[in-house]
Image (cartoon, grey):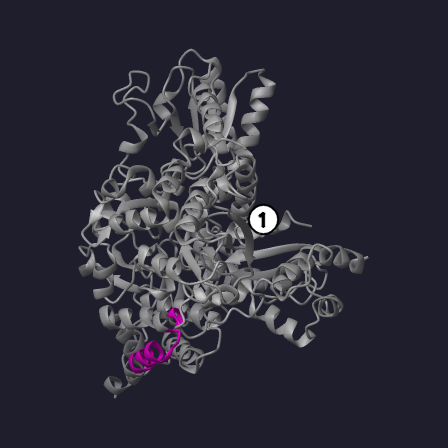
Amino acid sequence: MHSLKTHRTAAQEKWHELQSSRVPVIYVGTASCGRAAGALAVLDSIRKTLVEKQLSARIVEVGCIGPCYLEPLVDIRLPGKPRMSHANVTPEKARYLVTAYLTGDKPPVRSAIGHHGEDGSAFADKVPRFFDLPMMKPQVRVVLRNCGMIDPQEIDHYLANDGYIGFTNALRKGPRGVIEEVREAGLRGRGGAGFPTHKKWEICRNAPGNIKYLICNADEGDPGAFMNRSLLEGDPHAVLEGMLIAAYAIGASHGYIYIRAEYPLAIVHLNKALAQMRECGLLGKSIQGSGFSFDITIKEGAGAFVCGEETALIASIEGKRGMPRSRPPFPALAGLHGKPTIINNVETLGTLPNILRNGASWYRQFGILGNFGTKTFSLVGKIRRAGLIEVPLGMSLRKIIFDIGGGTAKKFKAVQTGGPSGGCLSEEFLDTTVDYESLGAAGSIMGSGGLIVMDEDTCVVDVARYFLDFTQKESCGKCSPCRVGSRHLVELLEKITRGDGEPSDLAKLHNLGETVKRGSLCGLGQTAPNPVLTTLRYFRPEYLSHVTEKYCPATVCRALLEYRVVPEKCTGCQRCVSVCPTGAITGPRAEVHNLDPSKCIKCRACYEICRFDAIAGDAIVIRSGRRVPDEQRA
Amino acid sequence: MATADNAQVLSRFHGDEGDLIPILQGIQGNLGYLSEEAIREVSHFLRISENHIFGVASFYSQFRFSAPGRNSIKVCLGTACHVRGGEILSHQIERDLGILPGETTADRRFDLQRVACLGCCALAPVVAINNDIFSRMTVMRLKKTLNEYA
């Protein structure tokens, strides 16, 4: 019998030892987003520098702390000094930092963006606290509390930070007590619909039968959302502890994690974490002598957006095509293999340990009545400070986009909440508070948490076409309004972005959108038209200019664009001539170049090279010319 | 050789219908795609028809039915990548390599896929080649990057 207490004591000692380490500690964020920004090369450079200069330091790989735009992030903590965060670290910069911190008598603290020490630390030399940075300060980190702070591959780090205390409390309270606590906390499903978690649980708990299942829905299919990936990579035990709590509450004996195959690193971390749980006696028969037995299997999704829907997900685990079925019966009564099944989202599960550890009333201090707690969002698109954030529900979109995200470089145009199932909201909705009801009233949805910000260079018609193209391809084909309707919606939108649209197409879009919404069985079809319907409602003039003037104000829709050389600016440097794949640009050196529109395929290569590499800069412009409507021409 | 590998994948399973997708994933992990022969073997093993297996496999975007190239290019077309020009990158690759998404070059050096989201949205637009992820990709850098893969 492995006692959790013994493990925890050992873990705390280990953690304390790291915190008071006598050798410098170097933290590198190596989640997927950090890796995409080059964190592995940075890590390599740090290791090499240490060997070459014969320096000793401990390296801790941590998950994503949130501000992805600052990746790769490297923190260095000298013994007895606060941890200093350095952003956008390259392999060369890493080499310099390590050398300067570990050998110099004056560490380059001033180049840090933040520190993790006491307020006003003399060592930090006026560098602000990391969590006081404009992007971090308005945030409340409940679910993400450990992300970026601990090594996700060490259960000891999790245990030392009050890990599995929530589960221990749950065992003391008993299943009914857990459900009651979650009811009192007012937790609603974080997967998108916001159904009260305890209600679903109660139905399953009361359902007859000995075999019940719990499924963790980690099929984060929304393009533009990565909250679940970050949590699973950065703190897998938080989700797994949540699974233990949920399984105990509903009486499940087996659990599945249905995770996208596109998240290989998260799968690696989960597998490691499961092995560690077994070692600590947190999985298997009669966990911690409680009589509660539970085990977890990982099921890799095979790439189908519709499998985020509960019944489709179940079909997929059963080895079938992931097609939804009609409800009732709800999975809570008859789900996987016909047994009562609860499907909870990653974030819902990640929230549970916090509620059980600190109590319902603690949780209720965050958020607003009816929408208690926090929600994670991936804040992306045309935003200055992109990344993963967590805020209390009830915060305004304006505060999220402008205070946390730093706003847009160009003029703000719209924000899409809820991914392809959500709506596109215009500037006048910026003061909408982010909660399930307010977003619903505006014609959008909370969704799982993707926030895509668009500026004046984004064409909303093109965005609507993009989303519909996505949902049309992901439609499973069961219901004809969704299968056929979404296809026609895409065709109409393509027609408009091609410049062939007619005014009557707008009414067609609207009517068809409403039909698809009403005539579809599952959430995919019921929400697929939202991007079209909301953009039609809030950005009608932009549709009209595409239709009547054949003009794309954002200069995005390719068929309506024209590339031109500005003779006054062109220095004849020939850079654009060299990159043009079709030979559309000609002209001798030092003379104004000529661009033949009939050969131009609008690939943007000349525009980019002129902006960044050429001598002139901005000598190539992309324009969308207004055309006089035919009826006015006569 | 391939058959032996497939047999090894199959030996890890009991033969329940629920194993179908993990089996196909295992086979694709070995072969790089699902060959007709492999589907036939799975059909014998699970006692379900080849048609049924093809029906399930073709439902999911992960499975491919033709041999991949030596290097797999994945252009992310998630929302964040879309608004930051992922489409333009995809067109550029299609033009440079002379293939469409889902196809492999004649010399089998590259195959091209468009994927919904790689989850690195803050670093958009993103292109992945094999397991290397390239962030904030531009038309200009693309050619140089492709040249690094033989």
In which quadrant of the rendered view does residue A146 lie?
A: top left
Instruction: State the residue lying farthest toward the right.
Output: B1
Q: Nearer the viewer, residue A273 or A391?
A: A273
Q: Is residue A102 above or below residue B109?
A: above
When asked about the image quadrant of residue A70, the answer is top left
| Number of numbered discs | 1
**Residue sitting nearer the eye, A372 or A566:** A372
Q: Tell me the residue at 19%/50% (across/down).
A: A368
**A16 w.r.t. B83: above or below:** above
The reply to whether the magenta stretch includes residue A520 is yes
Q: A330 or A291: nearer the eye? A: A291
- Taking the image as drawn, is residue A583 in sight? no
Residue receiving disc 1: B145
Q: Give the position of the N terminus of chain B as an image quadrant.
A: bottom right
Q: Identity of the amino acid at label 1? A: Thr
Q: Residues within 10 Å of mark 1 (few under 14, many from 20)?
A: few
Using residue A196 as the reference point, say whether residue A296 is left or right of it.
right
Q: Main secondary structure of the magenta part?
A: helix
Instruction: Tell me where residue A371 appears, x and y as whole percent.
Output: 23, 53
Residue A342: x and y, percent?
Answer: 42, 58
Q: Is residue A300 magenta?
A: no
Identify the magenta region.
A509-525
| Residue A613, above or below A29 | below
Where is residue A238 shown, x and y percent of the image?
Answer: 42, 41
Q: As drawn, which residue projects farthest toward the top?
A: A105
> At which x and y percent is residue B31?
72, 58
Which is nearer the eye, A81 or A2?
A: A2
* Element at label 1: helix
Q: Is residue A416 visible?
A: yes
Residue occupying the point 40% across, 17% down? A107
Figure check: A148 above or below A254:
above
